[in-house]
Image (cartoon, grey):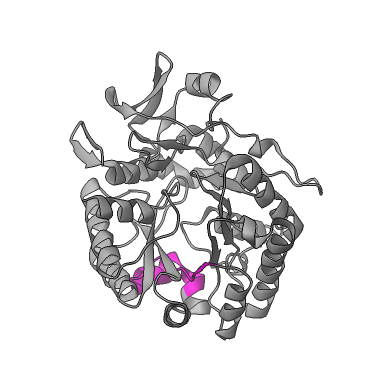
């Protein structure tokens, strides 16, 4: 794995990825103008741009300028409340062109060349019902098409959104103003998007995610319709990779059995934060309405019945101390549950009154901790290469290459 030496940093690709995701970057206009026709680099935060480091590590390319303007239009906020965080919404990373080549800089110092994925017409498409792909689905890295929130989060509507969640913040703000919730893609829309992504963009895997729900039966109806449409219109045999399903832990485990029977390959019941005191503040709905124990019961049921690696729980890396993160990740791993790792992106969404991200020593410790657990318990996160903001696959690849 590549190493990068610049300023006070001496980091590998996993650590650099964590820094870039958590701190964001600025992308020169010339990059969009000269490369946007041939590569997946667009001046629109909804396109979920990503870049590749020299060793092919996939990294989310969050241009702070576009990202913050998108958030402002989503929340129409309370913008005054953000002023005290403005010093935290800056970055020393920038992508500029040297001749025709995109280069990552830290301040004025060159870090490494980067490259982008081949261009796509994905975001220009609409389904037969007229639903635009843009804003409803994203391409993630090389292999994935992802749906972030197919139905509204009822916890957020009730005023208990997770503090770090952009979608939850939007639902909560709309509910407070008694405004209409966003459009919900139909199962047919989702199947059309997936079919296009498979046939035109080399996608082989799918992330299906909805908002947290109070009624397991209502969520089961949503998920059943989406998975059935995928099978009917795309064909499960044509999805060569995996279907990752993110669910609210149900109160009865037979619901989980039906999801696997419908084609899910792995199921997540994500705690996000292990530390109980922090979780009560950061993920209030999950802890108040669902409870930590219900998450653990569902995850343990999956691992015991379907085998190691079939259950996973996301952690938002950067929101809690290493000791509680280690406690939670170890608890899961030793039961055959993958502790997965999504890097906290704080831009515009303070958590516990802060938008300050950890330093590289924290990310290095997380990498080494998760690598040890993955190898010890033979846990293999999904995908061939990494995802935009998640590093569990990158960590496993790093551990295997040592």
Magenta stretch: residue 282 in it?
yes
* Left or right side of 358 for 241: right
- Work out whether residue 340 or residue 198 is closer to the camera in this orientation and state it: 198
The part of the chain drawn in magenta is 265-286
Residue 18's spot in the image, x, y percent? 33, 46
The correct choice, above or below, for 66 with respect to 330 in the image is above
Residue farthest to the top, as pictured:
99
Counting from the top left corner in percent of width and height, residue 334 is at: 30, 76
* Residue at position x 60%, y 68% in the image: 263
- Residue at horizontal 28 percent and vertical 22 percent from the top: 108
| Residue found 50% across the figure and 57% down from its top | 165
Find residue 394 and report its horizontal and vertical position in percent. Answer: 34, 50
Work out whether 118 lies above or below 144.
Answer: above
Observer-nearest residue: 348 or 249?
A: 249
At x 46%, y 51%, the residue is 349
Q: Front-most of 202 and 330?
A: 202
């Amino acid at each position: 794995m590549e190493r990068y030496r610049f300023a006070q940093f001496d980091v590998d690709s996993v650590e650099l990825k964590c820094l870039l995701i958590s701190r964001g970057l600025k992308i020169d206009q010339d990059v969009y103008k000269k490369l946007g026709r041939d590569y997946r680099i667009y001046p629109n935060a909804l396109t979920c741009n990503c870049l590749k480091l020299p060793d092919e590590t996939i990294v989310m390319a969050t241009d702070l300028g576009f990202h913050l303007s998108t958030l402002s239009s989503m929340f129409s906020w309370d913008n005054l409340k953000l002023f005290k965080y403005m010093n935290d919404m800056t970055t020393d990373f920038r992508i500029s062109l040297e001749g025709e080549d995109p280069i990552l800089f830290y301040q004025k110092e060159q870090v490494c060349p980067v490259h982008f994925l081949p261009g796509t017409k994905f975001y220009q498409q609409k389904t037969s019902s007229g639903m635009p792909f843009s804003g409803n689905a994203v391409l993630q890295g090389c292999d994935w098409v992802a749906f972030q929130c197919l139905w509204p989060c009822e916890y957020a509507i009730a005023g208990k959104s997770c503090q770090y969640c952009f979608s939850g913040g939007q639902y909560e703000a709309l509910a407070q103003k008694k405004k209409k919730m966003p459009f919900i893609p139909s199962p047919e829309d989702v199947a059309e998007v997936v079919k296009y992504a498979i046939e035109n963009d080399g996608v082989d895997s799918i992330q299906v995610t909805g908002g947290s729900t109070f009624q397991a039966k209502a969520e089961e109806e949503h998920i059943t319709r989406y998975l059935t449409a995928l099978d009917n219109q795309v064909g499960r045999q044509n999805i060569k990779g995996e279907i990752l399903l993110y669910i609210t832990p149900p109160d009865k485990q037979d619901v989980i059995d039906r999801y696997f029977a419908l084609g899910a390959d792995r199921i997540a019941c994500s705690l996000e934060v292990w530390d109980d005191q922090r979780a009560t503040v950061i993920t209030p709905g999950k802890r108040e309405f669902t409870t930590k124990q219900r998450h653990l019961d569902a995850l343990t049921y999956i691992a015991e019945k379907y085998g190691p690696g079939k259950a996973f729980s996301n952690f938002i890396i950067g929101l809690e101390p290493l000791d509680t993160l280690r406690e939670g990740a170890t608890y899961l791993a030793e039961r055959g549950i993958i502790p997965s790792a999504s890097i906290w992106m704080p831009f515009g969404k303070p958590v516990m009154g802060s938008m300050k991200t950890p330093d590289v020593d924290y990310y290095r410790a997380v990498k080494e901790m998760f690598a040890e657990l993955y190898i010890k318990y033979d846990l293999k996160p999904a995908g061939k290469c990494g995802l935009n903001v998640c590093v569990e696959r990158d960590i496993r690849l790093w551990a295997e290459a040592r």
